[in-house]
Amino acid sequence: MTVNGKRIVLALLLCLGVGITEGRGDVFNVDRELYPYYPSLVKWNKSSAEFTEPQTCAGCHPQQFEEWTGSIHALAFQDPVYQGELALGVQAVGHNISRQCEGCHSAAGVVTGEVKGPGLKGLSPMAMAGVSCDICHSVSGVTHWETPSHEPENGSMILTPGVETLEGTVLIKRGPFAPEEGCGGGFHECEESSLHLRADLCASCHQVYHFEHHYPLESTYLEWKHGPYAQKGILCQDCHMVDSQTFERTADTFEKPQRSDYHHFFNGANYLIYYLARGAAEKSGDAELMKNLDQKYQMAVNRLKGAAALEIKPIYQNGSLQEVLVRVKNMRAGHNLPTSLTNIRQMWLEVTVKDGKGKVLMTSGTLDKDGHLAENTRIFNSEGADPHFHFVVNPWEITSFSKHDTIPPRGYKDVYYGAAGLVKEGNLVFSAKLRYRQADQKIAEKLLAAVPEGVDLEKTYGLTQVPALPVVDMALGEAQISVRQ
Ligand code: HEC
Ligand code: HEC
Ligand code: HEC
Ligand code: HEC
Ligand code: HEC
């Protein structure tokens, strides 16, 4: 009996062991034939039709080209912050990971095999152009439901820049309209594509998963899909392919922009990259590009300033002030606020409490002289954990979040500050600021210090050191609060 009992336990354990390994495979199966560029899930219908660099499209589509130039999509591959992080990732876990990154940051470079890791040396204008015209307008389909996570992830789109016909190679560009006679000017054929009028076009790249474990590190698309804007048919394009005023109106009224309102700005929150690129334009003496980047910088700052609002409310107990509540509201972001690189980006509350005479009684969330935030700062972010649930920052190490504290679209988070006994009588002046920057000063320095050979921060960007990262005040609030009810 005991012997049998032991056997049964052993057999059970063996079953469990097998179950666990097989189970993991079942959850995230990778179809290597479907995804030849794994860990990127981008696909290419290879033919003699080549990708076309944006400068060629510019000849016939000057307005779209001008709007896209200087955009984050245009900078996605050359971005020194990206190049620095890519170099660190390759050093840490080997070369395989670079395909994953490049499948989104330079998809054409990956499928043609031209981009082979960090660095810009010897690359064609098409590879350097990042998320360019002929990436989006060659997308002929997506494989969102066949991916290992059965969700859009890591570039799960199909690129078909053209086809071979009996008459030779034909380039096909897909867009929102039913083509009219002469569409493409003899250079390309046109195809009406409903995909370009859906958020699925953006989803492949705006869902970033861990390169092996398929953990969603960035979930902009799913946050949007599970929120109120998707319910009312307001797409990524409706906020990010329009000017600032149209974006605000769309977000407030849930009414779609007019057909003629769409532009190729792809403007979000990352003003720092425009600031760096402006330095490069200044170095190379390109006044027009400087003006373009100044405008995009301002547009990103305005977008951040329009995204959130603060409310301040005293809380009394037995007639005396106990706490002050600060409600932080996501007013106009179509996804969580902030949404991506949430373990790096910093959006935090800075609070100052003064007495009636202006004497400071309490502060929280102020930056010290080295540009760091105090431990107890209320920050809306996520914290990464490795497979042993230890705190980590690098995206190739993060396989779960131990904290994920961002604000859903049209939602809010409440923060309570203890305020009992700060003064005996009279009023407090309570002021709060919601502040934003791209990263902690040290992290920015680490990433920029890692740029690969051939990216020269001083020669190209005019940087001898990493400047103090600019901070944007997204929302302000102030209230006079009586300490007695
Ligand atoms: C699924 C597509 C996708 C993959 C794969 C991907 N990225 Fe990105 N990456 C993005 C998007 C989208 C953003 C923009 C997010 C934002 O700015 O809020 C981004 C932003 C970044 C940034 C911030 C740039 C800046 O200027 O602040 C860095 C750094 C970066 N990625 C590095 C990497 C590295 C390294 C890898 C591979 C390990 C990688 N990415 C893989 C889509 C991707
Ligand atoms: C990130 C994806 C993306 C990139 C990059 C991109 N486009 Fe588009 N483009 C779109 C989408 C989406 C639309 C449809 C917008 C709408 O609803 O009208 C569009 C529309 C167009 C149209 C139809 C007219 C119009 O402006 O709405 C043309 C022409 C066009 N794009 C050309 C270009 C050119 C040229 C470039 C490069 C300089 C470019 N696109 C880069 C996504 C992209
Ligand atoms: C020789 C001129 C010429 C070149 C070069 C050219 N196009 Fe076009 N394209 C046109 C014309 C003409 C139309 C139809 C009118 C319009 O939308 O401007 C058009 C239409 C489009 C449309 C709208 C299609 C639709 O059905 O909604 C897209 C998208 C587009 N082009 C993308 C591109 C991209 C991307 C490139 C570069 C790879 C490019 N074009 C290069 C002439 C050109
Ligand atoms: C081929 C991949 C790809 C596609 C498709 C794509 N994006 Fe992006 N997008 C990126 C990458 C990569 C970045 C970040 C580049 C960087 O920071 O270096 C980015 C950045 C952005 C940003 C700027 C974020 C910031 O922090 O300011 C916005 C806004 C954006 N994308 C919107 C869109 C929209 C809207 C669509 C669909 C019409 C779209 N993207 C389609 C790859 C893509
Ligand atoms: C209702 C308007 C709205 C819609 C819809 C919307 N966004 Fe945004 N988006 C914003 C605002 C406002 C910001 C700036 C605040 C922020 O950082 O979230 C932003 C920021 C971003 C950023 C960079 C900011 C960050 O937090 O890192 C990316 C990337 C982005 N959006 C992509 C997308 C994509 C992809 C979609 C569709 C799946 C989308 N957005 C839908 C309004 C919108």
Image (cartoon, rainbow, N blue to C red):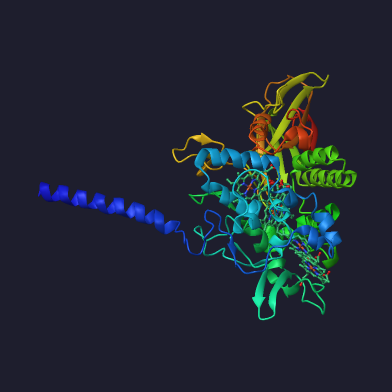
Q: Nearer the viewer, residue 82 or 259?
A: 82
Report which quarter residue 205 is drawn in. bottom right
Marker count (numbered): 0
Q: Nearer the viewer, residue 364 or 31?
A: 31
- Looking at the image, residue 15 sits to the left or right of residue 448; the answer is left
Residue 296, given in percent of the width and then of the height, sits at 82, 47
- Looking at the image, residue 139 sits to the left or right of residue 178; the answer is left
Residue at x 77%, y 20% (from the top left corner): 360
Q: Is residue 439 above or below residue 296?
A: above
The answer to whether residue 390 is visible is yes
Residue 305, given in percent of the width and then of the height, sits at 80, 43
Residue 146, given in percent of the width and then of the height, sits at 52, 64
Q: Nearer the viewer, residue 235 or 479?
A: 235
Residue at x 86%, y 60% (from the top left corner): 63
The answer to whether residue 249 is visible is no
Quarter of the rendering occupied by the C terminus: top right
Residue 278, given in percent of the width and then of the height, sits at 82, 41
Residue at x 45%, y 41% (from the top left corner): 387
- Looking at the image, residue 141 sits to the left or right of residue 147; the answer is right
